[in-house]
Image: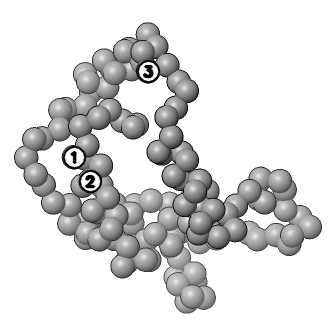
Amino acid sequence: MRELLNKDKEDERPRYTTSDQNTQGDKEMFNNVEEASEYWRNLWESEGTGDRYASWLEDIRSAIQRRVPPPTEEDWDLDPAVAAKVLAKKKNWSAPGPDRLANFWWKRAESLHVGVATAFQAISSIDGEYPL
């Protein structure tokens, strides 16, 4: 593990603090897998309270449609090597989400690259609007 960190080209490793130096924001993390899973399940599987028909949303949709070409209807495959190449361009220590996984670890968890590619393919085949 130390060898991987020493080879880090960006050399922007996070600076860890002792528990008495932590701020409230640092304490907001998951204690176990179930807690992380529940967080994301509630976020993605619950119905939102927003107004889907707000007038400003139509302006946003129009702007996106002018700039983004319509998706292809044919099936496509995302090679895990291409997904890994995209991950490689990400900054190693940019702020992780609530899962607390920095890009440094996503890059090196090569066994997950197939799953990342599969997830992007699945997302692209959804007929709904983004974000869901």
93 on left or right of 20:
left
* Nearer to us in this view, 123 or 35: 35
Q: CA distance from mark 1 to mark 3?
A: 22 Å
76 on left or right of 115:
left
Q: How many marks?
A: 3
Q: Residue at x 44, y 77 (%)?
A: 108
Using the rendered view, name the quadrant where residue 64 is placed. Answer: top left
Quadrant occupied by the N terminus: bottom right
* Nearer to us in this view, 56 or 2: 56
Query: Looking at this rendering, what residue extends furthest in the top direction?
Result: 55
Above or below for 125 versus 99: above
Residue 116 on image: x %, y %: 34, 64
Instruction: Report the amino acid beneath label 2.
Output: Ala
* Nearer to us in this view, 71 or 30: 30
Q: Secondary structure at mark 3?
A: loop
Residue 52: image tag: 3
Residue 55 on image: x %, y %: 44, 10
Residue 123 on image: x %, y %: 30, 49
Q: Secondary structure at mark 2?
A: helix
Q: CA distance from mark 2 to mark 3?
A: 23 Å
Residue pointed to by mark 2: 122
